[in-house]
Image: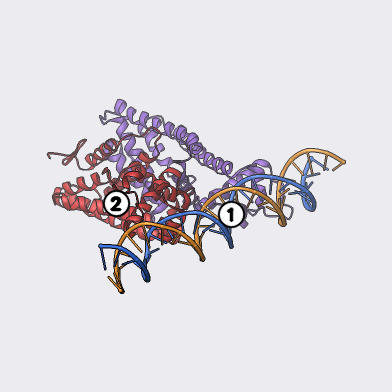
Chain colours: A red, B purple, C blue, D orange
Amino acid sequence: MSEAEQESRSEGRRKLSRGARQAQLIEATIATLAKQGYARTTMGEVARTAGLSHGLVNFHFETKEKLLSTTLVYLSDEYRESWQSALEAAPPDAPDQIAAFLRADFDPKICTPEKLSAWGSFWGEAQTRPMYQEHCSANDLYYTSTIEALCQRMNDEHGYTSDAILTARVLRVVTEGLWRDLMSMTEPYERDEALATVWICAAAFYPRHFGPQGLLGA
Amino acid sequence: MSEAEQESRSEGRRKLSRGARQAQLIEATIATLAKQGYARTTMGEVARTAGLSHGLVNFHFETKEKLLSTTLVYLSDEYRESWQSALEAAPPDAPDQIAAFLRADFDPKICTPEKLSAWGSFWGEAQTRPMYQEHCSANDLYYTSTIEALCQRMNDEHGYTSDAILTARVLRVVTEGLWRDLMSMTEPYERDEALATVWICAAAFYPRHFGPQGLLGA
DNA sequence: GAATTCTGATTGAACTGTCAATCAAAATGA
DNA sequence: TCATTTTGATTGACAGTTCAATCAGAATTC
């Protein structure tokens, strides 16, 4: 894993560009969070995971706090960009948009055991650290208002009558709960099973447009 | 807060019974987890919150690890006992049982900001600590199989045809997701609003028995 | 084009603070 | 008196931070 990240034809692999090295250290931080949890994530362990020296982490990120908050911002932005581009790629009709939105949360690039575990580590600490909340709450609010608007369009354009705010909240918390399941179950089920659970839920609210397999008539 | 916990008429407030002092320290641990998060929860802070000395914590719980795992067991058992007694107190018919079960998760005794925050702290760390998982996964499996059996009874006894396992999972992850919302939203909604969201969801699956206000025809 | 200089990435050791754990002595209650 | 609880100073380990020295590659000079 970390070997593959290193340049291919390279004995003297020293001196990666600033950005590449920082990305490597962020990856190592995610891996360490997933393996050790937040409380036992040390600078030394991150450096060891990256195959680099201790002091280098402090050269690129001045403090541990900055390393961790940068990692959180990285995860948070990657996540937001993922569902945003999924919405752009999907047809503009509300059911298609909702299907793309829900599916994006279980994209193989986003929904990996390692990243889910790192998210879980942050959730526990973020409540008590204003610095962490700042960036994430903005993304979270954006996410929430997006799904609320889509549920409202389902009512306006396709004749459903449910409370859009509440329906959006159900879809959102189902996804959150499934993420927590995926990261903590002793006998975990797979991404596709989680997604199937979301479809069941969408079908319960929008029976003319969703079924157990997702969007109907696709 | 910590002053109020101390005995009222008390110069000589020493020598509480063993159990009472341990309970006091567990309360202080929950409060500290909620206030500081797991990583910044220290023995000293727990002692200060309880208004007691540093060394005393090590006298009652030999190690920090034991203090924390005892606290987790306390929370976990209190939670299980809460929904178990709610089931026992409710009528035996499946809809009543499900209503009681879902409502129990938002009981004011269980669903306090402080306890939710402490749960969140543990969730992040529990993934990487087998000792934490042991006790909780047993309770979790029990919880899951209970709601699955109830959903199966809704099919058998009241003519619904949904996949009981999947429906149970939806109800479970909705609750989990709402808990996460309650503990992390910057503009949190209240317990009753969370419960209303659960009812919406139950109504979507069992429309003849549940409505936005909960159990129908009660 | 080779030698030299310069830049800044990288290392590892030393420093500093913090925390869990220990323990001897004091306080308390029976 | 005796056992138990409580205290607070002490200890040792460990983690984050700092920093001076090193080194590879780029730029510059001749």
Three-letter residue code for mark 2 = Tyr
Q: Secondary structure at mark 1?
A: helix
Residue A106's place in the image compared with B53, above or below, is above
Quadrant (top left/top right/bottom left/bottom right) for the C terminus of chain A: top left
Q: Secondary structure at mark 2?
A: helix
Q: Which mark is residue A157?
A: none
Quadrant in which residue C22 is drawn: top right
What is the distance, in whole Å, between disc 2 and disc 1 at their CAs?
A: 36 Å
The percent position of residue A44, horizontal first and vertical second, equals 47, 51
| Closest to the observer, D9 or A187 | D9
The percent position of residue B20, horizontal first and vertical second, equals 64, 44
Quadrant in which residue B93 is drawn: top left
**Cβ atoms under marks 2 and 1 closer than 8 Å:** no
The percent position of residue B82, horizontal first and vertical second, equals 48, 38
The local crowd at label 1, few if under 14, some if 14 to 19, many if 20 or more residues have their Cα within 10 Å, is many
Residue at point 26%, 28% (across, down) = B159
Three-letter residue code for mark 1 = Glu
Q: List the residue tagged with mark 2.
A: A79
Q: List the residue tagged with mark 1.
A: B45
* For discs 2 and 1, the disc positioned in front in the rendered view: 2
The percent position of residue B95, horizontal first and vertical second, equals 35, 33
Position of residue A60 in the picture relative to residue D7 (left or right): left
